């Protein structure tokens, strides 16, 4: 039953005139083929076309960079209101959570996910370590697990210690299992109600996981 809202949203996506930018590519025969709808183009120059869209498989907003070759791209752009409409629509597909940080501040975010950066927030994200919508955990009793956001009701964090409360009432406890041997910092990311549709980033909330006290999934 929990999948029903997502299924209904997918049906709505197929039948509703949702706004946003549409990206076309010319075929060898000269026809214009739409390769992406409900997107927002954030860069378009002589070499590259960069846009963001909601990736249904990953359940989050992602960036796509297209290298302009012999077959040209064109864009049918929406206005500012249309771009805000598509951001509001993206929020309906991803994971929604209320995050409480170590100071007690709470923030409601949409399209939540975890990504990895060098320690202390220095430098760009670690592209060799993919972002994810699950929490890998080294269990206290031994072994490891990776719990998808869809199964989580709440995450309580004290330093490196995690307590995961699942929607079925089961509780798992242990340590966050870093998916790389590189020095790395896990961050909890997402979109807030103040997110700017024209932003180069696909998030406007970024918090190191070790500075988060509690995550309540909605």
Image: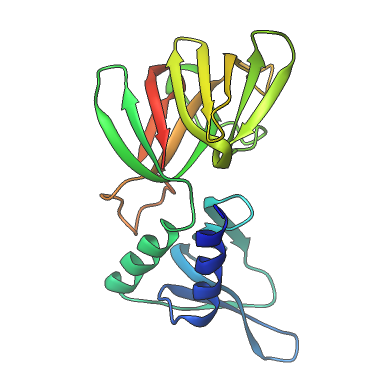
Picture coordinates of residue 61, whole percent (x, y): 50, 52
Q: Is residue 175 above or below residue 84?
A: above
Nearest the viewer among 124 and 167 is 167
Q: Is residue 132 above or below residue 24?
A: above
Question: For this view, does 30 lie left or right of residue 52?
Answer: right
176 w.r.t. 27: above or below: above
Q: Position of residue 111 (x, y in %)?
A: 45, 48
Quadrant in the rendering for residue 49 = bottom right
Q: Nearer the viewer, residue 181 or 194?
A: 194
Residue 46 seen by the camera? no
Q: Residue at x 40, y 76 (%)?
A: 19
Residue 86 placed where, x, y %? 39, 67
- Which one is in front, 196 or 177? 177
Q: Please state the total of marks drawn on the protein image.
A: 0
Q: Is residue 205 left or right of residue 180?
A: left
Name the residue at 51% across, 73% down. 13
Name which quarter of the figure residue 102 lies in: top left
Residue found at x 55% / y 61%: 4
Which residue does the image show at 55% across and 38% down from the upper left?
Answer: 149
State the quadrant of the C terminus. Answer: top left
- Residue 56 drawn at (x, y percent): 59, 58
Q: Is residue 130 left or right of residue 5?
A: right
Q: Using residue 136 as the reference point, say whether residue 98 is left or right of it.
A: left
In what quadrant of the picture does the N terminus appear?
bottom right
Colouring of the image: rainbow
| Residue 214 shows up from this direction | yes
Residue 147 vertical position relative to residue 19 in the rendered view, above or below = above
């Amino acid at each position: 039953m929990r999948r029903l809202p997502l299924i209904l949203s997918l049906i709505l996506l197929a039948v509703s005139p949702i706004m946003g930018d549409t990206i076309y590519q010319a075929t060898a025969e000269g026809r214009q083929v739409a390769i992406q709808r409900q997107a927002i183009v954030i860069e378009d120059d002589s070499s590259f076309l960069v846009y963001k869209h909601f990736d249904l498989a990953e359940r989050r907003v992602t960036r796509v960079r297209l290298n302009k070759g012999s077959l040209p791209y064109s864009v049918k752009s929406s206005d500012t209101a249309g771009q805000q409409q598509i951001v509001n629509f993206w929020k309906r597909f991803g994971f929604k959570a209320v995050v409480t940080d170590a100071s007690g501040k709470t923030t409601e975010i949409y399209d939540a996910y975890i990504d990895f950066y060098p320690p202390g927030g220095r430098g760009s994200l670690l592209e060799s370590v993919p972002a994810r919508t699950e929490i890998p955990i080294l269990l206290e009793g031994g072994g490891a697990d990776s719990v998808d956001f869809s199964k989580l009701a709440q995450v309580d964090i004290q330093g490196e210690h995690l307590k995961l409360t699942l929607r079925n009432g089961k509780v798992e406890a242990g340590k966050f299992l870093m998916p790389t041997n590189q020095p790395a910092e896990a961050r909890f990311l997402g979109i807030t109600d103040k997110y700017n549709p024209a932003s180069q980033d696909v998030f406007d909330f970024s918090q190191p996981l070790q500075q988060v006290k509690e995550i309540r999934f909605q």
